[in-house]
Image: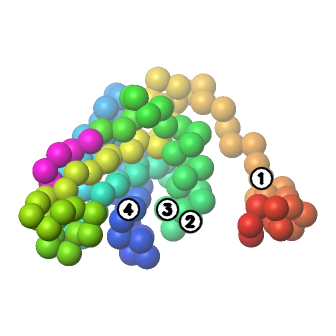
Amino acid sequence: MGQVPRRNTATLSAGLRRRSAAGTTLDRGGKWSSVASPAYLGRFVIAVDDDVDIWNMDDVWWAVLTRCDPQRDIEFLHRTWSGPLDQAIVPEERGHNSRAIIDATIPWEWRDHFPPVVVEPELAKATREKWGWLLGK
């Protein structure tokens, strides 16, 4: 498992690398979401491949948008451990919340045929320099 960025406790991303058949990443993500730091007030665990920088949320969301099929790759866990400070839960129900485990890894079935990332860092930099005003960067 990868490290968890601490800058945003509502969205946690872990570098869970899938090494076997489909579903394994979601299973590991569920376990990851239940341990100490991610479990307390956490709502999302996003599993990504090694080619995604977990410290860069643009990269993480890129992986979600290009590798995740919502029907197949998002699992919900109900009544998971939370805390009394959880603002998203009505006061009478605090102590439990739900979690979403998002599998943003390359689909296992496509692992040998998945299209490679075509944007080289140099091209990305040049694009941001030219169009950054439009992209908000």
Q: Position of residue 69 (x, y in %)?
A: 47, 32
* In the image, residue 66 above or below residue 29: above
Q: Residues within 10 Å of mark 2 (few under 14, many from 20)?
A: few
> From the viewer's perspective, is the residue at label 1 or at label 4 nearer?
4
Q: Which residues are magenta?
A: 76-80
Pick whichever of labels 3 and 1 is earlier in the sequence. 3
Q: Which residue is mark 1?
A: 120
Amino acid bearing label 2: Asn
Q: Which residue is mark 2?
A: 56
Pick whichever of labels 3 and 4 is earlier in the sequence. 4
Q: Say if mark 3 contacts mark 1, CB within 8 Å.
A: no
Quarter of the figure with residue 89: bottom left
Magenta: main secondary structure: strand
Q: Residue at x 35, y 54 (%)?
A: 45
Q: Magenta segment: does it hold 82?
A: no
Mark 3–mark 1 Cα distance, whole angstroms, equals 18 Å
Q: Residue at x 13, y 50 (%)?
A: 79
